Amino acid sequence: MSKIFLTDTTLRDGSHTVSHKWNTDDVRKIVTALDAAGIDLIEVGHGDGLTGSTINYGFADYDDFEIVKAAASAIKNSKLTVLLIPGIGTVEDLKKAQECGAKAVRVATHVTEADVSEQHIKAAKKMGMFTVGFLMMGHMASVEKIVEEAKKMESYGADVVYCTDSAGAMLPVNVKEKISALVKNLSIPVGHHSHNNLGLAIGNSLAAIEAGATYIDGSLSGLGAGAGNTATDVLVAVMNKMNIAHNADLFKTMDASTNALLPVLEAKGVKANTNLDTMILGYAGCYSSFLLHARRAAIRFNVDVREILIECGRRKAVGGQEDWIIEIASDIAKLKK
Amino acid sequence: MSKIFLTDTTLRDGSHTVSHKWNTDDVRKIVTALDAAGIDLIEVGHGDGLTGSTINYGFADYDDFEIVKAAASAIKNSKLTVLLIPGIGTVEDLKKAQECGAKAVRVATHVTEADVSEQHIKAAKKMGMFTVGFLMMGHMASVEKIVEEAKKMESYGADVVYCTDSAGAMLPVNVKEKISALVKNLSIPVGHHSHNNLGLAIGNSLAAIEAGATYIDGSLSGLGAGAGNTATDVLVAVMNKMNIAHNADLFKTMDASTNALLPVLEAKGVKANTNLDTMILGYAGCYSSFLLHARRAAIRFNVDVREILIECGRRKAVGGQEDWIIEIASDIAKLKK
């Protein structure tokens, strides 16, 4: 399978979850962590795109351009992207975002309305930005229709086109069908963006990858509108398990959730969707009863608890063999010396 | 695809989440709702199976047999099942469970240890019980090994054999491979039980169904050990969307979560894993912004909010068309007269 490029939208789609109340400190902290984790594109701004901060879509604490500037000041390797919904944001807004440091834009329209993206995609390309066509509510168009609309975006100059399951309404079989058709009919890469309403965000992301999508969206711990997005951290774990190539580092992506996002959410009284303790147990293939013992051993031998669990899984430790954890932690500590 | 038979394990695997502290009232309430929803098998008892209430596995509030009796008193159409892990529970315990009203048993062993289930499966069959072989930690055996172990359970007389992903460590590709091999090599039905550690409980359940499994486990709102189980309510919704035959009623399964389980959990200070509001939005394929308006219209016209949302999805209402909701609710109300 081809290499996957990840776009993390914690600071854009996830902004719905915090009522668009990220501040510039939050943004710098989370962007720094995502950048360190090797996420390809980091999306920031109001949940409804550039200048979405209105009475209709919810007022944000800071304006989008301050958020873009803060993100740009923290980013080193990742590409900084904004979302623009024609009708909410304008080409002038996009120019301002670029001046503030945005390198990419995702121009989003309803799945049957690609026409309205023409001037924005063309303008973005002329401005030298990496430009993604983002077809929202992908479940509402037939395969033929979504191909037709995607081809329009391609013709305007888009570098990538997404089939976006905004309502979390798609099934793996639908995703496969639509992504396959897009891959077959376009000469640019195809992306997919999932929501977890039917518990299928990860399952649908895998179906998209299987069908040839190479751009996949996620958000840390699945933070996002409705039931949340595909969890970037979980997706990275699953891709590792499947030997799918990508640029992200699993532990650093988890750290971005645990050390950067969660304290920010806690301060806002918002809960994350994903438990990374149970995730790493599944990744390792260990019994839950191992976690507490592994945590103790991690402190005792000064090693990462995740490495202990992964090694327990590799050695096929089963329930009742918790004593083995000490030996494993000690072995890991020795290897590190 | 063949018809799917659902086993709900809220009151067994979900019992881990409440530290095995269901009381007989909780059990009666939840069993009544599951039974009304058309769930085929309802599993009750300690999370680690019959007589698991020990210092090792966690003391329960009531003994398992009281729980079985309470469940039996509430059940009308579903089959009442218990779980038995040889080494924790005994054949004597099983006899007692049957006297209390259990009609089925799932005899559970580590995936490589089917041998230890021989006497229990044979005894259960002799007692006239519906008998399921339950191979736990299914990710820890190769395809060949799990087939070999499942064939043993079949030879002891099991009516069904499960590949159980106890650690939530399997990927759809693994599930497909193992379930297909079991279906091919056994002459009895094959089942699958997922956990959501990698966000794949629903995705893996679908992969299992696609590969020919006809028995699938879930728990209300995904309540269960670790990251939780496949959410029965979400699975029913997804199967409806895929036109997969089963015996459950979607709204009544959701009601079992919302009206029976959630108040019980709330009293215990435990949170559910699944948000059924966002689930029904995904099922219907509607924008989140529709929910509040649909709720108001549901009260005004005395119709089910879920019917309104589903009809909005059917009519392909999009953002900005919230006014349509009133008309739709009124139409539904008229049709009901």
Image (tube, coloured by chain):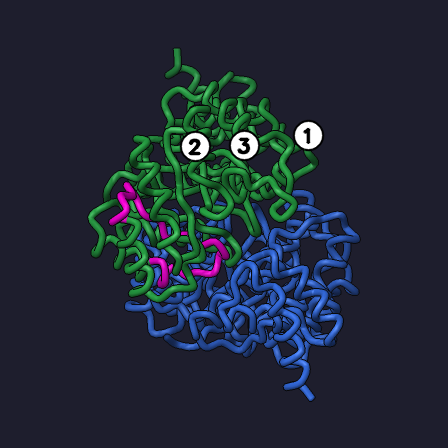
Chain colours: A blue, B green
Crowd rating for badge 3 (residues with CA inside 10 Å; few <14, some 14–19, many 20+): many
Q: Name the residue under label 1.
A: B267
Residue B42 - label: 2
User: The disc numbered 3 marks a residue on which chain?
Assistant: B
- The amino acid on which the numbered mark 2 sits, given as a three-letter code, is Ile
- The quadrant of the image that shows the N terminus of chain A is bottom left
Q: Along the horizontal axis of the image, is A226 left or right of B76?
A: right
Question: Going from the N terminus, do you reach mark 3 or mark 1 first?
Answer: 3
Figure check: B19 above or below A126:
above
- The answer to the question of whether label 3 and label 2 lie on touching residues, with beta carbons closer than 8 A, is no
Q: Quadrant of residue B84?
A: top left
Count the marks: 3
Figure check: A225 above or below B25:
below
Q: Quadrant of residue A15?
A: bottom right
Could you tell me which secondary element the residue under label 2 belongs to? Answer: strand
Give the Cα separation between the discs numbered 2 and 1. 22 Å
